[in-house]
Image (spheres, grey):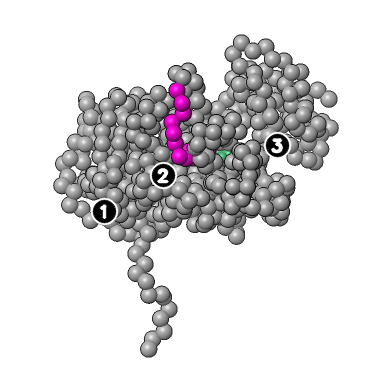
Amino acid sequence: MPTQTLGAMQGQSMRITHVIDHAAREASGREIVTHWADGSETRTDWAGIRRDALKMAQALEALGIKPGERVASLAMNHSRHLVSWYGVAGMGGVLHTVNPRLFEDQLEYIVNHAEDRVLLYDAAFQPIVDKMKDRWTSVDHYICFDSGDHSPSFEEWIGEQDGHYDWYQGDERDPCMICYTSGTTGNPKGVQYEHRSTMMHAVAGLQPSAFNFSSGSVMLPVVPMFHAASWGLPYAGGMAGVKFVFSAVNDPAVLHDLMIREGVTDSAGVPTVWLAHFQYCDREGLDLPPLKAATIGGSACPRFMIERLMKNGTRVQHAWGMTETSPIGTVGGPTWDWDQLTFEEKVDKTAMQGRPIFGVELRIVDLEDMTTELARDGKTSGALQIRGPWIIRRYFKGETDATNSEGWFDTGDVGIIHPDGTLQLTDRTKDVIKSGGEWISSVELENAAVGHAEVAEAACVGMYHSKWDERPVLFVVRNEGSKVTADDIMDHLKPLIAKWWLPDAIEFVDDIPHTATGKISKKDLRERFSDYKLEG
Ligand code: ADP
């Protein structure tokens, strides 16, 4: 008898066409609802998404698109965008979800760098297309997702096909999607996801300690499909056969109404989305929608938000990740000791960034040498590194690996790991302030400052200091009409942080610069204040 070296299982390759086949077979009638930019609403289901994805794959082949080539989308969340997630991958192509909020130079750079051949776009972004068309050198075909005056429209274009198509069969390590980071330093960088990495990431996302999806879930993702792969939801949702409710507009009134009308149980978005939702409900005298779970990430979820959602009976899944990590790295869910915790303790824990989902490993290392591993003691902070099957190895067209020789990727974040595995982010590597050989967390200072009722926004940066190397300076945007003084804010900070962390100066500004994805841009803030001199 010959020795059997491989196991004896079937081992189908992990290509994401399996997800849409499964969803169409097992959740065929589960609805996919879209609220479009013009206010109209349409309904399809998983079987319909697969039917259109097959036609789209054919239509792309008819245009001469080859496996491995990039097809771009410039679009909000809707069912036709979902079709593209499966249709492009189904013919072996690579979907490049372009963030329409990027600045023009970045839009030019990423489309040309990815060498996108086709661009699918929402009519709402026609002005961007008109402006950029001459600068995008590789795009041969423009197809509008909306019908109307636009020709060809997506429906016309795929309508020419009969849908008799066999999915392209390739290797599970082939690319299926590319997302660019928003480029807080230098040009944006492309992260190319594989079929296998995407599948594994989506499977991991289904866990009870992550998204906790089932076929009964009704998911309204507010996180855009153009940002960090919409946290993998379009694929995880297909695996579980959830009902999706999409909105092509991010108006809280529309989102609220959809959540109530469609029986939404789960949602996902960055904290600002919830802020807008709270404000809307307060203005209109409405209760928050009765969601079972809200996944919040992309930036730190403030305590008051967690408290309010938890009091509403909504489980808050505070997640951390980045484009380079597909993006889910950690998710907060009830830990084993949850039932023994007080409400306050639950809020404290949820304000941290959650625990790694199975598949990824996290560690913190010394900020100076970037290799010595530090204790997971809930006290020591260090540079956060990650590795796993859906973590980047190399940027698109990069010449060297983005990881060290042991596969660790440096996230650029700084954090503490607690003994139960909970990650607590404290800063970004570039932003921690080194004062007299000790580290000060700019984020903790900011969090303390925004806790003042008259502070609308705060950003803290380290400024050169002749004696201490760097000292913190806090930039504050006051609430409208507020006359709060630097002394008032200092008094507010004193009981909250160590004395030597108190900022050397508090400066009031009209606004704080943000990146295209809405995060505070300390790079721009530092540039704006490059002539700033601290006394002493
Ligand atoms: P980009 O890196 O292009 O700005 P990403 O969405 O990939 O866009 O951003 C990832 C970064 O966002 C992380 O490295 C981290 O600094 C921050 N971030 C993500 N989630 C959280 C969170 N839950 N709490 C605090 N910061 C977060």
Q: Nearer the viewer, residue 423 or 292?
A: 292
Q: Is mark 3 within 8 Å of ligand 1?
A: no
Looking at the image, tell me whether mark 1 or mark 3 is earlier in sequence order.
1
- Decide if residue 529 is in sight here: no
Q: Residue at x 38, y 36 (%)?
A: 264
Q: Residue at x 52, y 39 (%)?
A: 316
Q: Toward which corner of the image does residue 259 lie, by quadrant?
A: top left
Label 2–label 3 contact, CB within 8 A: no
Q: Which mark is residue 171?
A: none
Q: Toward which corner of the image does residue 456 lie, by quadrant?
A: top right
As helix, strand or loop, the secondary structure at mark 1 comes to helix
Could you tell whether 394 is left or right of 88 in the image?
right
Q: Residue at x 54, y 41 (%)?
A: 318
Q: Which mark is residue 441?
A: 3
- Disc 2 to disc 3, C-alpha distance: 32 Å
Q: Quadrant of the N terminus?
A: bottom left
- Decide if residue 306 is in sight here: yes
Q: Residues within 10 Å of mark 2 (few under 14, many from 20)?
A: many
- Residue 517 in percent (x, y) is at 50, 32
State yes or no: residue 401 in magenta: no
Looking at the image, tell me whether mark 2 or mark 1 is earlier in sequence order.
1
Q: Is residue 405 above or below residue 115?
A: below
- Disc 1 to disc 3, C-alpha distance: 50 Å
- Residue pointed to by mark 1: 25
Camera-side mark, 1 or 3? 1
- Residue pointed to by mark 2: 233
